[in-house]
Amino acid sequence: MIKAKIVPWECVQTKRPAFKELGWKVVFTNGCFDLMHAGHAQYLQAAKALGDVLVVGLNSDESVRRIKGSSRPIIDQENRAFMLAALSSVDYVVIFEEDTPLELIKFIRPDVLVKGGDWAESEIVGADIVKQDGGQVYSLPLREGLSSSKIIEKILGQA
């Protein structure tokens, strides 16, 4: 069941007409999701509450390395995808190779786009596309004091 939620881009796109017919809103968010923590789970639950189907775009290992540095990710993409897919709030996980999810957003055309509160709406990649399609964009509050980077610093004794 869990692995069935980890799908290629085309799978979500082909389901979009059925979702629309049912009146379901597709919510999209993305991230590296390295070292899953309670903040991630809370954020994804809040994202799911904004619609009916939650699609999570997951940065590939190479993408994470380009964004976060050569020591990241700590957890490889297959295991990060599995952890995300195991959450009841997540309906689909799609892995993308690019540094941003722009092409994936253009491809899926979600009804709702969500990022964490550390992103201003004007900085959210794809916000213009979603709004142009009549969709909504949200910047959700993050759980204070929790981040994968801070957890790694603590483990290394740097915090």
Image (cartoon, grey):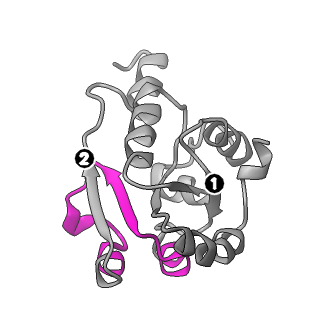
> Callout 1 environment at 10 Å: few (<14), some (14 to 19), or many (20+)?
many
Q: Is residue 26 above or below residue 108?
A: above
Q: Amino acid at mark 2?
A: Gly
Outermost residue, front side: 22
Left or right: where 93 falls relative to 111:
right
Q: Is tag 1's residue or tag 2's residue first in the polypeptide sequence?
A: 1
- Tell me where residue 145 sits by quadrant: top left
Label 1 sits on what residue type?
Val
Q: Is residue 84 left or right of residue 146?
A: right
Please tell me in which quadrant of the rendered image residue 132 appears: bottom left
**Which labelled disc corresponds to residue 70?**
none
The residue carrying mark 1 is: 93
Quadrant, the N terminus: top right
- Pick the residue in front: 19 or 60: 19
Residue displayed at 79% across by 46% down = 3
Magenta range is 103-130
